[in-house]
Amino acid sequence: MRSRTKRHLTPDALDALLRASAGTGCRLEQELTDGWFNSAYRVRLDDGRPAVVKIAPRPGAPVLRYERGILGTEAMVYRRIAALPPGAVPAPELIHADEEFIVLSALEGTPWDKADEHLAPGTAQALRHELGRITARLHSLAPADGRFGYPAAASGLSAADWRTAFTAMVEALLEDADRWHSPLAVPARDIRALVHEGGYALDEVTEARLVHFDLWPGNIFVRPGDAGQARITGLIDHERAFWGDPAAELVSLAFGGGTGPDSPLLAGYAEAGGSLGPESTRRHREALYRLYLGLLLVVECAPRGFGEDHLGFCRRMLSEAVAGLRSLG
C-alpha cells in the first residue's frame, strides 16, 4: 500500500541529501516499499558499503501525535542496542542520524515473512526460541529518567507512572480519531471506560522497559537454513518503541507464532532472564495492549490514505480487542 506520509526522492536528490549532512554520497540501488510510514532506500555509499536510508515524512505531513519525532526514537534505540554486549540484540549499525533521515548498515538475510517458505522443517520453532532470548535482552534497556511512554519529546506522551502514560497514549489516539473522523466501530467513551477499568492492572507495572511494539515477522531478518544454521540477523524499524510494560511486546510477536506459556518464544525469553511482570494481571494487561494496537491501526488509516479493505481488517481487530476486554468482566 502507498502511504501519504512517504517522501519520494530522485537518485540525485537522495545523493545530495547525504552529501550535505553525512559527508558522503550514494548510488540508489532500490526503493524499499514494504514500510508504511517512512520512505526507505537501499543505496551504495561512496566507500562501497551497502546501506539503507530511512527518510522521515516532510514537515507538516499528516501524522498521528505519537508519531511526532519517532525517527529520533529509532536512532536512540540503535545507539542503546550498540552499547549492549556484542550480538545481544542483532540490529543494523547506525551510520548517521539527522532530524530528516538515518543511514543504517544493510543487514544480511531476509525479512522473516518472505523467508518463511524457505525455512527447513522445525527451524521456525528454533528461531522463535532465539527471538525470545533476543527480546528479553532488548527489554533489559530502561529509560535514564525512569519515565514511561514515548521517548520523543514532541509527542508529549510520557509520565512518571505507566497507568498515566498509557492512558495519555490512548487519549492521544482518540483525539486523532476525532480529528480524522475515524470509524472506530465502538464509541470512544467505551474505550476510555475499558482503559479506566483496567487501571489496577497497569499499576502493577512499576519499572519501564524498552518495548519495540512492532515485532511482526516483516521487522525480523533471518538467515534461512536448517535448524543448526538458521539464525536471526537483525531487528529493524524501532520507531514505534516506547518505555513501558514488556508484556505489551506479545501483541506484535503473536503475528509470528504462539506466545503462550509453553511456547518456544517464552521459553527462550525466560532462559535469557526476561520478565513479563505480575502473572495475576498479565491477561488483563495484554488485552489492553491489543486494544491499543487495534485503535492505532484504525486511526492511522485516514492520514495515510489506506483503502476500505485494510480499514475493515483494522476495525475487526479493534472490535475483537474490545470484546476480549469486556469478557474479562
Image (spheres, rainbow, N blue to C red):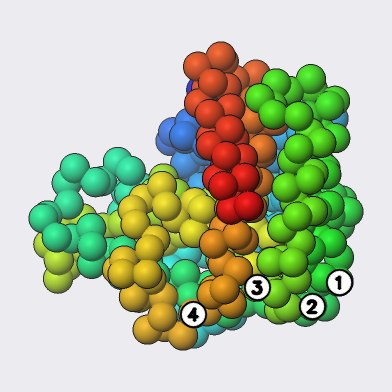
Q: Amino acid at mark 1?
A: Ala
The residue tagged 4 is 274
Q: Is residue 150 visible?
A: no
Instruction: Measuring from the top left, give residue 266's x and y in whole percent.
Output: 38, 71
Disc 3 secondary structure class: strand
Q: Nearer the viewer, residue 314 or 111?
A: 314
Circle nearer the N terminus (3, 1) = 1
Q: Nearer the viewer, residue 62 or 320?
A: 320
Q: Is disc 1 in contact with disc 2, using a CB cutoff of under 8 Å?
A: yes
User: What is the spatial separation of the Cα atoms under label 2 and label 4, in whole angstroms?
Assistant: 19 Å
Disc 2 secondary structure class: loop
Q: Residue at x 14, y 71 (%)?
A: 228
User: For residue 16, which quarter of the picture?
Assistant: top right
Q: Residue 146, which numbered label? A: 2
Frontmost of labels 1 and 2 is: 1
Circle nearer the N terminus (2, 4) = 2
Q: Residue 209, which numbered label? A: 3
Instruction: Measuring from the top left, give residue 67's x and y in whole percent.
Output: 74, 43
Q: Is disc 3 in contact with disc 1, using a CB cutoff of under 8 Å?
A: no
Circle nearer the N terminus (4, 3) = 3
User: What is the spatial separation of the Cα atoms under label 2 and label 3, in whole angstroms?
Assistant: 9 Å
Side of 198 where 24 appears, left or right: left
Disc 4 secondary structure class: loop
The residue tagged 1 is 160
Side of 82 where 266 appears, left or right: left
Disc 1 secondary structure class: loop
Q: Amino acid at mark 2?
A: Gly
| 10 Å crowding of disc 3: few (<14), some (14-19), many (20+) | many
Side of 123 where 72 appears, left or right: right
